[in-house]
Amino acid sequence: MLKKMCFGILVSATLTNQTGAQTPDTVFLEELTWTEVRAEIDSGTTTVIVPTAGTEQNGPHMVLGKHKYRINTGAERIARALGNTLVAPAMTYVPEGNIDPPSGHMRYAGTISIPIEVFSSMLEHTARSLKQHGFSDILFIGDSGPNQRPQEEVAELLSAEWANEGVSVFHISDWYKVGVFDEYLISQGASYDQIGTHAGLRDTALLLAIAPEHVRANNVSPGRGSDVDGVSGDPTIATAELGRVGFDLIFNAAMDQIRELMELD
């Protein structure tokens, strides 16, 4: 009995010390308790980002979670720049091609694909959940190509439905318009063949800038084509420095669009 009492006192003291800490400095919804989220909303945090990513092949040299690492980094930066903004958990299951017979990235081990209508339903019900809790500006930001059209369609559908309720849903398309980074790479002497369309110079540089531990340096080699090794472009000339410039360019483009859509100064 005495041992149980002593253990209970120890646990209580430990929890008291831990819970006495202030709310953590985080914008990620999943890192907060429900009471902390409610307090954030009550104090004016009414914007929320819904990041979408993907679980797909990225060549032999980059992990399947490339999009998740990129979008979480970007979403956090955007949330902190906007202020009064939280970030919902990233959606990592998205349309990636037909499953059987496999097409697109589904031809490579580890890729996970869901139908477009399932992805759209996930977006819709995530937004409905967030609205119910008191968020009034919901931003869909996707780091993968197949995510873009469903995000746009669901955003338009819900914004029309909630037009008289003071709730808006925005599709931030400029996050995925990487042309601004491509233009910079061209200005630095790269060719479009080197930049590639998947897992090449551009993609590899961006991941090196934010999560270099997820790039397998010993597996980096010029792409042999998307039908051979899943790589289009030349990742061997990618650097973290280039990636940091690209990330800044993409971030600035997305922020400009957000400010325009939300009519922010």
Image (cartoon, helix red, strand yellow):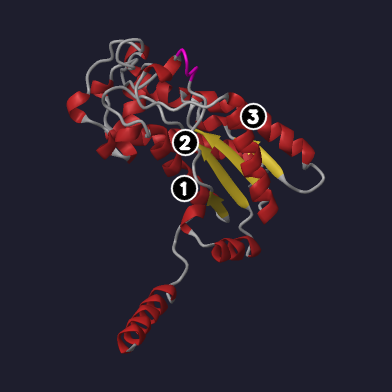
The first of marks 2 and 3 along the sequence is 2
Q: Disc 2 or disc 1, which is closer to the eye? A: 2
Q: Are marks 3 and 1 in contact (CB under 8 Å)?
A: no
Q: Earlier in the sequence, mark 3 or mark 1?
A: 1
Pick the front one: 214 or 248: 214
Q: Residue furthest left?
A: 218
User: What amino acid is found at the position of numbered circle 1 in the picture?
Assistant: Glu
Distance from label 3 to label 1 (Cα)?
21 Å
Residue designated by label 1: 76
Determine if residue 134 is in view.
no
Tell me which corner region of the image, top left, top right, bottom left or bottom right, holds residue 164.
Answer: top right
Nearest to viewer (mark 2 / mark 3):
2
Furthest-bottom residue in view? 2
Q: From what the image shows, is residue 113 above or below residue 21?
A: above
What amino acid is at disc 2? Thr
* Percent x, y of residue 87: 52, 49
Question: What number is the disc on residue 92?
Answer: 2
Name the residue located 47 percent from the left edge and 38 percent from the top edge: 251
Where residue 152 is drawn, which disc sits there?
3
Which element type, helix, strand or loop, lies under badge 3?
A: helix
Q: Nearer the viewer, residue 31 or 152?
A: 31
Q: Position of residue 123 (x, y in %)?
A: 61, 37
Region of the chain picked out in magenta, as a range: 97-101
